Amino acid sequence: MGTSRTDAFSKDANGDARPSFTEKPGAAEARAAARNAGSATVRFILPPRDGAGSHRRGSLGCDRIVPRGARARQRLRGRARRPPRCAPGARLVGVEAKAGSHARALPQVQARRATATGPMPTTVATMLLAAATCSGGACVRDPVDRFAERHGFRLDGGRGFVPEAGDAPQGRLLARRAGETLRIRVTENVGPEQARSQRAGHQALLENLVEPQLPPYPEFLTRQTWCPARFHPVRTDAPAGPVFSLPASERLGYGVCADELVRYRASIGLFYCENSRRLARIEHFVPAGTPAGISAVLESFRCL
Amino acid sequence: MSVSRRRIAVAGAAVLTAIVAAALVLSRRPAPAGAPPRAARLYWFIPDGLRAEPDVFRVFDWAREGKLPNLKRMMDQGTWGYSVPVFPSHTPTNFATLLTGTYPAVHGVSDGPMHTEGAPLEKPSLGGFSAPAKRVAPIWKLLENPSRRTVLLSIPGSTPPELDHGITIRGRWGGWGADTPAILFEPSDLLPLRSAAGRAFRLFFLGEKLTRFVEKRPAAGWGGELGFGPPLEATLSAHGLDLHALVVDSTDDGRAGYDQVAFALDRSRPLFRLAPGRWSDWIEVVLKWRDQPVASHMRVKVVKLWPDTGNFRIRVFFDNVNRLLAEPPETAAQLVERAGPMVDFADNWPAQLVYEDEDRETFREEAMDSLAWHKRATAAVFDLYKPDVFLQDTYTPNLMLESRWWMRHVEPGHPGRDPAQEAGAWKDVLEMYRGVDAILGEALAHAGPDTLVAFSSDHGVLGLRRQVRLNNLFARKGWLSSRVDAATGQPAIDWEKTRVVYLKMAYVYVNPDGLAGAWKRGSGPAYEALRDEVVHAIRELRDEDGTAPLVRAVRREDAPRFLDLPDDRVGDLVLEAAAGYQWWEEVTPDLALFSTPLVSGYKQAVDPQANRGMWTPFAIAGPGVRRGFALSEPVSHVDQLPTILTLMGERVPAHVQGRVLREALSARGETAAAGRGAAGR
């Protein structure tokens, strides 16, 4: 399981982020080029800090942001067409985590890494850092980052997912990234006991889907459903709580017990942040056939 | 303030009031002719098993006669007619057809329980009520986007939930959720009586026990009044709850006469006391499902009490929705708070309220309560969630028309018909249709001028006369072997020695090499020869009056062509039954081929084209719909979805097989159709 630590970053005179850890040569230039091109994402390839196989991945963000309402007011008053997201004097901060347990990266992520770094050693996972680019206090940040921060958590593995267009209901996000789908639902104002109950109930619902049941229209011979073990949910433990992995249909539905219906492998976690009294259900869908293992997206969940 | 200023102020206020009033009035009126032709919202009400045809269930005539005022409103404001389901003419297949605009060969739902190669035949591996079973997207996925709020209430095939943003409340039989069906309790003294009464009773003996037999014993440890005779007690256990019942004689007349039952969760503190025929109020309870506590509600009825013995027939009805039957979970409590504990299901499936005369009234009460609940829920959903897409179903019409008590008396020519009961049966049936109409009325009252309102059903219901035990026929032929199961006392299939078997609803599986283990479809000359023999044997079948129950047998490979069925989700033979005949799996020691069931309605495996009793209503009103227009010919179920999508300005997917009902479109609707390129479909 990964561990997490927060590192501070400083800014140079030009407002560029200057990470406190060692960047791969050329990373600063790449970041600058991306900023000039208007891109919000820069990939960092970082060697292990201690050179002993402790691989890192991370993200950047402002440690203080201008509230959305204040930005809107600035826009209305005509003070700024695109008011900065970072509060004056905000620092860029980053989170890094050991990535050794994420060796089963998703194919498209691996491909992206390969593009950035060339062939990767199979025994050494490389770093992927989706960074915010801040200039003059204005940050263009990853939408999943923004959503997560707004709801009191971090989901660094969710970088690069693009939310579907439109105004999703409060606390919900559906985002896609090259064949993967990320679905998040956050429930507010949940007490610890209620959270425990909802997590247990959710687990029971998942497990019940594959249990032998009385089928629809039962009769003398048709009286018990069948679902082979390979379709059953598998539990693993992520830092934020248990994660269930199971097959899902083309429309991201569960309870699939026939090969012809399996399109995705889903990882589901219900994670509770006691400080903010929020319960987040994170579902990460990857194409069927992706090697089983804990989802890097879910494993990256941290309460703020 | 001077007089002139006051006049100006008064005049200004009057003008403002007039503007506000005009805005309110205009907001309730249909969109003016120049408004965009598209409907922005959809309410689609699909009550299950709502028969409608020109001969017996003349719903449009009833509407004109003032019996169904809201359907009449739909007729005046929109387009209406009949719609024809698809074979095998039951719920999962036809909901999938309505909701995808495709035939079963495309959407893949050929039945409720389905079998796939590689899985054992004795256990269905695909559930037709399960959302993922559909091979193409249903309307809620076609219309879903983050800005659109979708609510699915009691829709078969909607669970496990697959909406990304919307609300799914209680699907049906999708294998998802903490369902807590109503349970009947009787003392074990009545077990032999019930076993002798009908096979449908024994069915639940093999599955979930919807009627439970409990020990009746002398009462002890009770607080409060114990009456005058020797009190009796029993513990009624269901869904993790122990409800104690105390049977008492409340009259001091010197004679044994049990006439009341007290109920308690704790014997020292009885909750209430009921005379036969009375329902209790709802009380809050905590049930258990898979070790999870489930906050719920319960109410109780003493259906019947035998005064001399203290035997009882007690129905315990549990709230049909809870946090583990709704997505998001909190919507369950919101809905219950507004509409009360949910009564979604009258009786059970298989039917349990079919043995005592008192069951009829209990069924009727549950049915009407369910329709009243759905009416309240309609208002609650519109108010609470302001849905852009709202699909609603109630199962009550199907359950009522299939039950023992009504169809036999209203369908002409039914052998179980009693003319003396016809008027009473029609009164109840019309009351049920009025309950459905009231739900429609609630939706019409809440729907805005930009809402498309559609009203249809999945299938009608026919009178059921006889059940055909095909597996007994195969046993007689030596193709099927059975033995008595020591645990249940019932015959069970010996799969090792079985080469031919009938499995619900319309399918016969054949393999000369045997059907045990992982099922593999047969092939080759021996397979073809055996299949031909089976067809011949079924074709030769005759009932006592000479009626042939088989209309046609279609080979699996021909099923897509002749019946629009998927060839990989059906048996080796597909059997179409004659009206009034139902294929039945049961194997009995006497190997009898025909039997008369207690229930009097059904719908499975008959041809909806040939049997008008299978038809359903279709009415649609809203932006772009032609007003006051009667469709001259019945439409097909597959036509409803593309018509709805077109009226909403949505693209009709290429796989949709139905046509846009252009005759139902107004000039504005035509504009919308042309705008989406759907006119030519």
Image (cartoon, grey):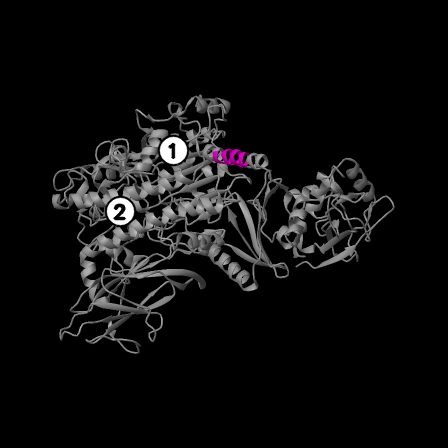
The question of residue B19 being in magenta is answered with yes
Residue placed furthest toward the bottom: B221
Q: Nearer the viewer, residue B468 or B13?
A: B13
Q: Main secondary structure of the magenta part?
A: helix
- The answer to whether B672 appears left or right of A14 in the picture is left
SS for tag 1? loop
Numbered tag placed on residue B400 in the rendering = 2
Density class for disc 2 (Cα within 10 Å; few <14, some 14-19, many ≥20) is: many
Q: Position of residue A224 (x, y in %)?
A: 36, 53
The percent position of residue B233, horizontal first and vertical second, equals 26, 72
- Label placed on residue B103: 1
Q: Quadrant of residue B76?
A: top left
Residue kind at label 1, given as amino acid type: Tyr
Instruction: Give B126 or B142, whichever is nearer the viewer.
Output: B142
In the displayed structure image, the side of residue B275 where residue A54 appears, left or right = right
The location of residue B112, given as percent across then percent down, is: 35, 45
* Magenta span of residues: B10-21
Relative to B400, say whether B555 is above or below: above
